[in-house]
Image (spheres, helix red, strand yellow):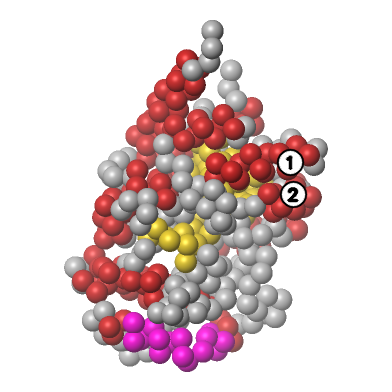
Amino acid sequence: MKPAICEQFGIDFPLFAFSHCRDVVAAVTNAGGFGVLGATAYTPEQLDQELSWIDEQVGGKPYGADIIVPAKFEGKGENLSRGQLTDRIPAEYREFVARLLADHGIEPEDRQRLGGSSLSGDTGRELLDVAMSHPIKLIANALGVPPDYMIEAGRERGVPVAALVGAREHALKQVQAGVDLIVAQGTEAGGHCGEVSTLVLVPEVLETLEQAGSDIPVLAAGGIVTGRQMAAAVAMGAAGAWTGSVWLTTEEAETAPHTVQKMLAATSRDTVRSTGRTGKPARQLKSEWTDAWQPNPGGHQTLPLPLQNMLAEPIIRRVDVLAAQGHPGAQALATYFVGQGVGLMNKVKPAREVVREFIEDYLAATERLSNSLPD
C-alpha cells in the first residue's frame, strides 16, 4: 500500500526534489518522485517557458513550483523602483566589495553592476499566475507565511500550498494561515534555514500540530541526501522528505563547474550559515566571500534583504565565470547554497540514479529497523 502522501500527489515514492534546474525537476518526476522548480529567479515570461518545457517532458506526471515571497524585506509596501532600492545600498558597501575583489586579483568593472533581487517578493503574484496556468500539483513558499493571494489561489484551483518552517511556532502560524503541507527544515539544510536540527525539529513540529488538532502532512528537510536519512525521518512521523542539496551535483544540474568540484571535495563541516549572500541566514559553502561577511572583528555587517542580494548576486555570478576559467582568486571566493549533507555528495550522477539509490537505501533502512524489533 502506498503512503497517503503518495496517493495524494500521485507519486510512487515520497521524495520531493527542489531544484532551480528544470532538467532535474523533470528527471525526478519521471523517476517516480516529485520535482519542484525553484521559480523565484525567473521573469514571468521565462517561468512560462520553463514550465512549458517540463509539461512536455513529464507527460502529465505531477510536479510543483516554489515561489519565495518573503514576509519581511526592505521597501515592502513602498512600491519602490529598482533604482530606488539600489539607492539604499550605501557607497561604503560598494567600496568594501570592490576592495574584496581587488584583494583577490579581480579587476573592477567600469561600473559596478547591481542586480534586481528575486527575493523582494515584487513579482510573486505574477509568477503565481503563470505557475497556476500550468498543471502544477503543489505551490510552495518560504521566508514566512504565504501571502493571502497564494493560499486563495491554491484553494480556488485545488493546488495544495506548502510552507517551509524552521521552528515549531512557525509551523503553528502556517497552519493557522491555512497551508496544506508543512516542510520542517532543519539547520543542516542548504539555503535559508533556522538553528534547530532536523532530528529535533521534525518531532517538535509534529507534536505542535497534533496539539493544535491539525493532521496536515509534514515533510522532513535539512541535510537529507540518502534514503536511510529519509527512513529515519519517516520513522519519526514525517510523511516523506523534501530535498535540495543532493541534486546540485547531478548530471542535469546547472551548478557552476568549479562549485560542483568544491562540493564533491567538501566535508559536512565546510558549510556555514551566512547572511553574506541574501541578508538572511542561509547555509552555503564556506569561502573567502562568506568569511568576509562573518559577524566578527574581521567581517563586515550585511545589508537587509533584498539589498544584500542585489549587491552580491552580480558579483557571485561573475566570480563563478572566472572560477571556471581557473582564476585562483575567484575560486577562493566561489560559494553556493548547500547543506551539511554535502559531505555525503562525492560523485556526479544522473538524477534518476539518485532517486533509485534513495529508494534502495530507504528499503534497506526500513528492513534494518524491522529486524531490530524483538520477536
Label 1 sits on what residue type? Leu
Marker disc for residue 309: none
Confirm whether the magenta stretch covers residue 235.
no
Label 2 sits on what residue type? Leu
Q: Residue at the location (20% across, 68% down)?
A: 325
Pick the front one: 206 or 106: 206
**Residue 229's spot in the image, x, y percent?**
46, 35
Circles 1 and 2: CB distance less than 8 Å?
A: yes
Tell me the element at label 2: helix
Confirm whether the magenta stretch covers residue 90.
yes
Pick the front one: 370 or 216: 370
Instruction: Give whichever of discs 1 and 2 has the lower sequence position.
Output: 2
Which image quarter is the C terminus in?
top right
| Quadrant in the picture for residue 24 | top left
As drawn, is 16 to the left or to the right of 354?
right
| Quadrant in the picture for residue 323 | bottom left
**Residue 28's spot in the image, x, y percent?**
44, 39
Q: Is residue 61 visible?
A: no
Q: Residue at the location (49% across, 21% down)?
A: 369
The image shows residue 332, relative to residue 369, as above or below, that is below
As drawn, is 310 to the left or to the right of 205?
left
The image shows residue 33, relative to residue 81, as above or below, that is above
Residue annotated with mark 2: 172
Pick the front one: 158 or 165: 165
Main SS of residues in magenta: helix
Task: Magenta stretch: give its range.
Answer: 86-100
Q: CA distance from mark 1 to mark 2?
A: 7 Å
Q: How many marks?
A: 2
Residue annotated with mark 1: 209
The image shows residue 184, relative to residue 288, as above or below, that is above
